[in-house]
């Protein structure tokens, strides 16, 4: 897939002016919107979303997950790419392990999964 994106981008560079390249690049890179059913998120995550509206959004309104909610959703997913991302958030102090651990009980997971999530967060923090 990465190779296809690179090929698509190189073809755009050869054929289209700079503005069209930028728009096409954005279309290729856009991720689908996140809704409550898409990810496992802590309770009350909607109360913590950040509203984004400026010239870069063409006046449109977007809502972004709080970094803590994003961290917990990715930690619960347990994919390798998510592990790297979450550890970087911890390493560069975007959040603390304590903050994440405090919200684990609000995750819609059974007790065993919450225990596993807490152990994972502690293990990542210890590895840094």
Image (tube, grey):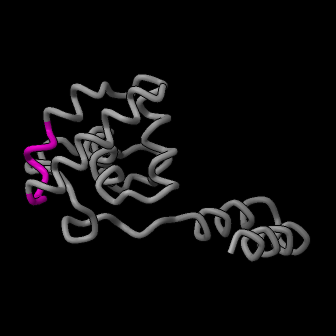
User: Quick one: 108 or 39, which is closer to the camera?
Assistant: 108
User: Quick one: 47 or 124, which is closer to the camera?
Assistant: 124
User: Quick one: 45 or 125, which is closer to the camera?
Assistant: 125
Q: Is residue 122 left or right of residue 58?
A: left
The residue segment tinted magenta is 103-110
Image location (x, y in percent) of residue 29: 58, 64
Report the number of discs: 0
Q: Is residue 112 above or below residue 127?
A: below
| Residue sticking out furthest to the right | 14
Image location (x, y in percent) of residue 64: 32, 49
Q: Is residue 39 above or below residue 103?
A: below
User: Quick one: 60 or 128, which is closer to the camera?
Assistant: 128
Quarter holding the N terminus is bottom right
Q: Is residue 48 left or right of residue 24?
A: left
Q: Is residue 82 left or right of residue 16?
A: left
* Residue at horizontal 44 percent and vertical 59 percent from the top: 79
Is 117 part of what is drawn in magenta? no
Image location (x, y in percent) of residue 114: 16, 50
Q: Is residue 88 left or right of residue 59?
A: right
* Residue at horizontal 52 percent and vertical 55 percent from the top: 81
Is 104 part of what is drawn in magenta? yes
* Residue at horizontal 46 percent and vertical 48 percent from the top: 83
Image location (x, y in percent) of residue 3: 77, 72
**Quadrant in the rendering for residue 118:** top left
* Residue at horizontal 31 percent and vertical 25 percent from the top: 96
């Amino acid at each position: 897939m990465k190779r296809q994106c690179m090929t698509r981008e190189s073809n755009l560079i050869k054929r289209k002016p700079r503005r069209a390249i930028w728009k096409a690049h954005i279309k290729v890179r856009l991720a689908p919107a996140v809704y409550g059913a898409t990810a496992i998120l802590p309770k009350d995550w909607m109360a913590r979303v950040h509203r984004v509206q400026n010239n870069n959004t063409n006046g449109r309104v977007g809502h972004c997950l709080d970094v803590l909610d994003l961290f917990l959703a990715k930690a619960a997913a347990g994919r390798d790419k998510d592990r790297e991302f979450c550890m970087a958030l911890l390493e560069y102090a975007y959040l603390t392990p304590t903050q994440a651990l405090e919200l684990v009980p609000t995750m819609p997971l059974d007790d065993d999964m919450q225990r596993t999530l807490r152990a994972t967060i502690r293990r990542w923090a210890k590895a840094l």
